[in-house]
Amino acid sequence: MAGDVPRAQPPPAPAPRQHPYVLLWRWRRNPLRRPTDRLRAWIALGLLLAVLAAAPAAMSAVGDAAYRHYRDTAAHQERTRDRVPAVLVHDAPRHPEPGSDEARRTRYPVEVRFTAPDGATRTGKADVTPGLPVDSTVLVWVDPAGGITEPPLDAGQIRSRTMGWAILAFLGVALAGLAAHAVTGLVLHRRNLAAWDAAWAATSPRWSRSP
């Protein structure tokens, strides 16, 4: 009858939860388990333990080496770089929102004139605050060759770069473990296929033999 309200349907049955033993089927005794299944399970466990042991060690070793490298780099930069006064050659661009937080963080590249460590007068680009007029004086970092460069690495930059290398080391060990697991799985899978082909070659004549 048109307009009848359909009868309510029972809610769908919840998905069956996997028993913990199902996840460990390669260790459980069952007639379908092959020797390669158990071998693959042990290899996976060994790789997992190896990654858990090697990843922190790799992070520590790589992080320590990176920290020493960037610390020495910062010390070398502090010894070889000089901070000298420079004069703006022309006005710096004005920010569209003067006085805003964005304006205080923004820097514009402007041509400046400075005296290099060798006594020669040179020009280059330096990042300055918006709105500085021509002939304003700013401080710039100059390398031994007399070019404007970045300031020496500070403690925060050293720390962040060290952490970056340590994280890359951890990911490298984890990816190496996954790659090893994939390769061993592929090798064992091909071995299973070869064993299946051999067993079928021995069995198929009895199945296909005419009565």
Image: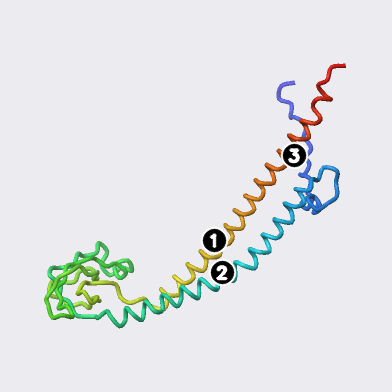
* Residue at x 57%, y 62% (from the top left corner): 173
In front of the other: 105 or 100: 105
User: Which of the two labelled residues, at mark 2 and mark 1, occupies the earlier sequence position?
Assistant: 2
Amino acid at circle 1: Gly
Q: Classify 10 Å Cα crowding around label 2: few (below 14), some (14-19), many (20 and above).
A: many
* Residue at x 48%, y 67% (from the top left corner): 165
Secondary element under disc 1, as helix, strand or loop, is helix
Amino acid at circle 3: Ala
Q: Which residue is mark 1?
A: 172
Which label was assigned to residue 138? none
Q: State the image quarter where residue 13 is shown.
A: top right
Amino acid at circle 2: Ala
User: Which of the two labelled residues, at mark 3 and mark 2, occupies the earlier sequence position?
Assistant: 2
Q: Residue at the far right: name it.
A: 211
Instruction: Please give left or right for residue 14 compared with residue 47 in the image.
Output: right
Circles 3, 1 touching at the beta carbon (< 8 Å): no
Which label was assigned to residue 58? 2
Q: Residue at the far top: name it.
A: 211
Q: In the image, is residue 12 above or below residue 105?
A: above
* Residue at x 46%, y 76% (from the top left corner): 67
Q: State the image quarter where residue 119 is shown.
A: bottom left
Quadrant including the C terminus: top right
Pinpoint residue 207: horizontal percent, then vertical percent.
83, 24
Pinpoint residue 113: horizontal percent, then vertical percent.
14, 73
Pinpoint residue 126: horizontal percent, then vertical percent.
22, 70
User: Which of the two labelled residues, at mark 3 and mark 1, occupies the earlier sequence position?
Assistant: 1
In front of the other: 25 or 205: 205
Secondary element under disc 2, as helix, strand or loop, is helix
Its colouring scheme is rainbow
Q: In the image, is residue 21 above or below residue 91?
A: above
Circles 2, 1 touching at the beta carbon (< 8 Å): yes
Circles 3, 2 touching at the beta carbon (< 8 Å): no
